[in-house]
Amino acid sequence: MAAATATKTGARPVRAGRRPPLAWVGTVPFLAYAGIFLLLPTGIVVWNAFKGNSGGWTLSNISALNTGPVRTAFKGSIELCVISSVAGAVLGAILAYAVASGNPEGLIRRLYLAGSGVLAQFGGVTLAFAFLATIGPAGLLFKAGWYSNFPWGIGLIYAYFQIPLMVLVFLPAIDGLKIQWREAAENLGGSTWHYWRYIAGPLLTPAFTGAALLLFANALSAFATIEAWEDQINYVVPQSISGSLISEVGLANAHEGDALALGLIVVVVIVMTGYFFLQRRAARWQS
Amino acid sequence: MAELNPPLADLAADLTGRPAAARRPGGLRASQRRRLNLFRYTAFTIFGLFFLLPLLSMVRFSLEGLTPGSWSVAAWTQLVSYPGPPPLLSSIEITLELAVISSGVMLILVVPTMIWIRLRVQWFSRVMEFICLLPLTIPAIVLVVGLAPIYNQIERYNVSALMLFWAYVVLALPYAYRALAAGLAAVDAKTLSEAARSLGARWPTVMLRVIVPNMWQAILNSLLLTVALVLGEFTVAYLLGYVNLQTNLFEISRSSENAGVLFSASAATLLFAFILLLILSYAGRRLRRGQR
């Protein structure tokens, strides 16, 4: 009995009222690891983005971002991310609805969920090869003239991992729709259109927008797929970062890569903040 | 008119003596259900084709002989014999070793810390969560810019590509953390540990023999996610100048665009990931059954 009350109040039964002073030491190994390989690199990027070529602080790395090639890369990134995340979100939501409206224990649902788990991670070099074999210059399905077109060719390839990711992220929201709501709408004389327009639609909007933002950030950080698809032209920001990192020696501005990386962090952080905010809103009625 | 239909449908169902068949689950009328099923199977077919065709093309390409349309397993035997440079087999070995080391380090680092925080330093859990989810907002391509100077130091002591595990553990943190957090949340860790402690168990015993056996499923999930991530990792290895499977394939594709070995190696990687997932879901179901 005493132990039960102690658990509830959170105090330890033996030395009540005194926090064990050394308990936090147990987190030190993890903190040290994350500090060296996660926080320190991030700090280095931010630090170097404001560092001049000959030491000293400067904003010239940031202002140097306002040049033709960098503007093109940011524009290309945003174009590709908008196309692939909007298409991925809409198509993924349709697929998620098709999956959710079936038998929850059924084979199709398990197949699509397991498949989505693998395919959402299936970015990278391998994915570019798969599409090369399908619709590339020697493609087996057909030889698409627009295969190497930016952003449509690569946008289609991105959809291949964006749609499964959308299914994974959006399915819980659709599963949260209660049958009773639909029945209530029908009993009050509402049609299918009314149900979607006034009940399911508004309820799903935060979850949908949040998921679309996650897809946007996902496409923004993707590098391997587009590099394997075309490594001669820098279409997107990750490619420019890679370019400036590899050719750092001959570069006039040694810290351009850091400034580009900082720019990418800023965009991703804004997008992901929106995602977490909307996700919390959507979770309010899901439980 | 629409609101008159359900009672009529019920009546007809009553008359034919099949009421259960007329009202299917989901709160839908039979006609709506038919339309929904039509939509579902159309969607499954179209999306299924979209997901399967590239995979099938890749496999077919890997099985093509010297002349178009012929069949050959040459590309698959090349998996072990492709000369490189660097030889494909050695990069496959390195990648598999990296997968083992990274998932091992990840577990040793994260699991005890998460349990410890849950039991003794609850106020710290928000910090832990923030740190673990941080790599989602710091993409690999950004992280690698800051990792380059750190790896310059590491290379003074060890130039092996196995050193990539330091970075891979960080990349795997968000996925592993979410899998483990879900597992830990389902365990009444506080009560279990108090019971074990009052019976005289020491902290390592509490963790390894009381809490961990209750979250095998989550540990397996986090392992799979880490392994899948390492198998497909390209960005960090490429920009730090190491050779793993993906960077090796990339180099091969630069020198000979349509080398069959590209497709056989890619298909093999994917197949391996699928098999891992199958094994884990099977093991997971057996574990759940065992707990009941």
Image (tube, coloured by chain):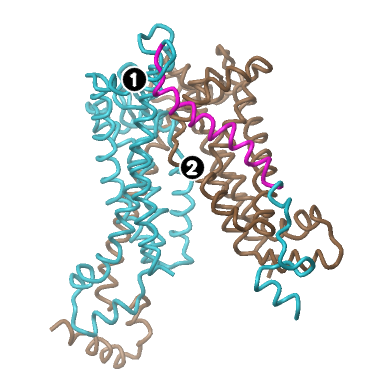
Chain colours: A cyan, B brown
Q: Is residue A159 above or below residue A238?
A: below
The residue under label 2 is which amino acid type?
Leu
Q: Is residue B35 visible?
A: yes
Query: Of A263 and B83, which appears nearest the observer?
Result: A263
* Residue holding disc 2: B134
Between residue B183 and residue A123, name the one nearer to us: B183
x and y percentages locating residue A286 in the rendered image: 40, 68
Q: Are marks 1 and 2 on the same chain?
A: no
Q: Which residue appears at 21% of the width and 72% of the height?
A: A192
Image height check: is B41 above or below B112?
A: below
Which amino acid type is shown beneath numbered disc 1? Asn
Placement of A96 over or under A261, stated as above or below: below
Q: Look at mark 1 in the image and give the residue it sits on.
A: A61
- Residue B242 horizontal side relative to residue A112, left or right: right
Most distant residue in the left direction: B1
What's drawn in magenta, residue-wise?
A26-53
**Residue in front for this viewpoint, A175 or A202:** A202
